[in-house]
Amino acid sequence: MSRTVYVNRRYMPEEQATVSIFDRGFLFADAVYEVTSVVGGKMLDFTAHAKRLERSLGELDMAAPCTMDELEQIHRQLIERNELDEGLVYLQVTRGAADRDFAYPVGATPTLVLFTQAKSIIDSPTAQTGIKVISIPDIRWGRRDIKTVQLLAPSMGKMAAKAAGADDAWLVEDGFVTEGTSNNAYIVTADGTIVTRDLSNDILHGITRAAVLRFAAEAQMAIEERPFTIDEALNAKEAFFTSASAFVCPVVQMDGQAIGDGKVGPVAKRLREIYLEESLKTAT
Ligand code: PMP
């Protein structure tokens, strides 16, 4: 079935949606994006995603394509027009189309593209079973805090995981885990402390990460924001990851070794429940 998508101020059937070959998103990956999850036709944490988008744009001196209120309305329109009950809204802003030149063009009009993806995200099989990860070197650039569409390194990581019979890869730099290919990474230590890397330019500042840490703190769970090693992960009681499209998902195996007892742990399970319950309360 054809979706209605949004391209530069127009709603249209996906077959008709096009972007210029001179678009800098295409030529330079000069573009940023956001993914917002939808449950029961409502968005989870839209305001936080809009704020992160503004920050990404600001860090790259890229003009905003419209106001954040207009952006919210476009999200709502797409959810409505596509009768999206559960899934995702993908948004991408590029610096726009201009003759190819490394220097940013002056006065280019930003390209804005949005589309929906229907997907069962609450009843996901991986949340029940947990996933297997491998560890690989983090070969990405130094501004991972900006949510750009430069996603080839993460794609290569996912393929390496697949080739090894695993589901995802955790990225390692200077001996410490940065994050998963498309998610933030956590371990639970022997004394029950939740450990996840502190915020810096090394990782994406996950919207789900912020919410989960807030809910964990409210539930009196112990949290340490610091880098951890693969060795610590292998010896952890539990591991899990967070992202807007997977919420909280357990990691039960790393590099072919079971983490903890190799089963979904109680902390990941509880955090997923709390996250879903609390986020749905404030969904818009
Ligand atoms: N890190 C990376 C590299 C990601 O791509 C993502 C998801 N896009 C995340 C973390 C998780 O961020 P969020 O919770 O905002 O989806």
Image: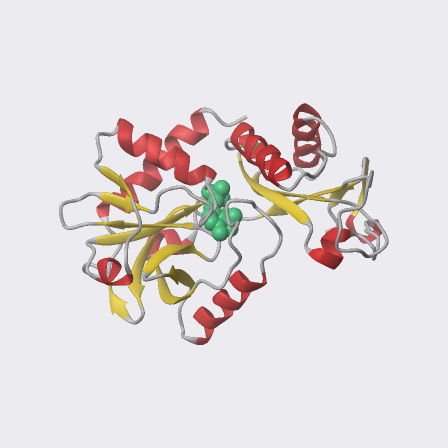
Evaluate whether residue 53 shows in this view. Answer: yes
As rendered, which of 165 and 54 lies closer to the eye?
54
Evaluate whether residue 120 shows in this view. Answer: no
Q: Residue furthest bottom?
A: 163
Q: Which x, y percent locates residue 110?
A: 77, 40
Vertical position of residue 145 compared to residue 41: above or below: below
Q: Which x, y percent locates residue 62?
A: 70, 39
As rendered, which of 129 and 54 lies closer to the eye?
54
In the image, what residue occupies the spot 46% across and 41% down? 205
Left/right placement of residue 122 relative to residue 193 reads right
Vertical position of residue 219 compared to residue 34: above or below: above
Vertical position of residue 213 compared to residue 144: above or below: above
Q: Which x, y percent locates residue 121?
A: 48, 46
The quadrant holding residue 107 is top right
Q: Residue furthest front?
A: 103
Number of numbered markers: 0
Q: Which x, y percent locates residue 95?
A: 74, 44
Left/right placement of residue 218 relative to residue 68 reads left
Left/right placement of residue 109 relative to residue 79 reads right
- Quadrant assignment for the C terminus: top right
As rendered, which of 157 and 121 lies closer to the eye?
157
